[in-house]
């Protein structure tokens, strides 16, 4: 114990100050040392208050930086997310830095691509079926059950422009069909709180090609035209459904205000 070693060093010279092992005198010094050790360890923890990976007051530091962890996030995921928020100010809002922030938060293998030179974002964002009747699979076989390449699913993505929007609706106590009668001590407009619902905002890709360059993409590995450098394909990247809100918040926090994010994401 460090405190006992310090205490022994500070004692005066002489046999009186050298207690017999396991004696009451020895236990007295142990008690004094243990009391000092508690204070020492507490002061030692203060050194890590501002370190997102070691802070003992994780929730307080999250509140300071406006980080809201999801319900199912592990402590390690929370610390990684907090770290990406705390050290963002020194970096410009580029695709490379956004990609690194996502990876720092635990979304390894994700890519961020600027739309440069710009192509129509609908190529990647519009919903399409993975296979359709009368179309051949990549290997040249018919799309039928039993084929290794056959899959039944939708491809496409979504646009991220703003955070989730919520609507508060009054929960009226007295409504038609609720068995309300005259003289029942009822009042017009009497409410029992409010019902909060998530508003689904649907954004469309601008028809003007001049805006296409302001949309970047987040997804898996991509292929490019070897001559023009244009994006050709982007694979879907899988994100746990429990971390969907966290994933989107990182993008909204670190992307430029004027830009839109095209997510080629599959929530699992």
Image (cartoon, grey):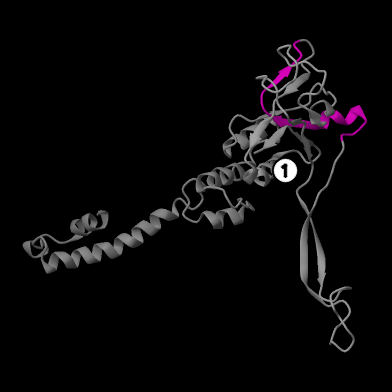
Position of 24 relative to 213 (above/below): below
Whether residue 208 appears in magenta in the rendering, the answer is yes
Left or right of 178 in this view: 137: left
Position of 169 relative to 162 (above/below): below
Q: Residue at x 58, y 40 (%)?
A: 105
Q: Determine which residue is flagged by label 1.
A: 252
Q: Which element carries disc 1, helix, strand or loop? A: helix
* Residue at far front of view: 145
| Along the viewing direction, whichever of 125 and 137 lies nearer the viewer | 137
Q: Position of residue 255 (x, y in %)?
A: 73, 38
Whether residue 202 appears in magenta in the rendering, the answer is no
Q: Quadrant of the N terminus?
A: bottom left
Bounds of the magenta segment: 205-226
Position of 60 relative to 237 (above/below): below
| Along the viewing direction, whichever of 40 and 72 lies nearer the viewer | 72
Q: Position of residue 54 (x, y in %)?
A: 46, 48
Position of 188 relative to 134 (above/below): below
Dot 1, crowdedness within 10 Å: few (<14), some or many (≥20)? some
């Amino acid at each position: 114990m460090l405190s006992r070693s310090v205490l022994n060093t500070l004692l005066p010279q002489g046999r009186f100050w050298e207690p017999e092992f396991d004696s009451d005198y020895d236990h007295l010094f142990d008690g004094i040392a243990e009391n000092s050790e508690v204070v020492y360890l507490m002061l030692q923890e203060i050194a890590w208050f501002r370190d997102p990976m070691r802070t003992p007051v994780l929730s307080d530091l999250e509140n300071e930086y406006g980080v809201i962890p999801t319900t199912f996030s592990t402590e390690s995921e929370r610390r990684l997310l907090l770290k990406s928020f705390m050290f963002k100010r020194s970096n410009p809002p580029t695709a490379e830095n956004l990609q690194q922030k996502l990876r720092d938060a635990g979304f390894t293998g994700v890519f961020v691509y600027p739309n440069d030179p710009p192509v129509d974002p609908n190529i990647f964002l519009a919903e399409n079926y993975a296979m359709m009747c009368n179309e051949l699979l990549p290997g040249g076989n018919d799309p039928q059950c039993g084929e290794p390449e056959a899959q039944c699913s939708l491809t496409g993505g979504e646009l991220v422009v703003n955070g989730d929007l919520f609507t508060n609706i009054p929960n009226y106590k007295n409504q038609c069909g609720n068995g309300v009668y005259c003289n029942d001590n009822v009042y017009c407009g009497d409410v029992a709180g409010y019902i909060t619902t998530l508003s689904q905002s649907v954004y469309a890709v601008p028809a003007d090609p001049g805006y296409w360059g302001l949309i970047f993409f987040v997804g898996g590995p991509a292929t490019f035209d070897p001559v023009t450098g244009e994006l050709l394909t982007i694979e879907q990247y899988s994100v746990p459904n429990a971390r969907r809100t966290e994933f989107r918040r990182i993008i909204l926090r670190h992307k430029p205000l004027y830009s839109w994010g095209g997510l080629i994401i599959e929530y699992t």
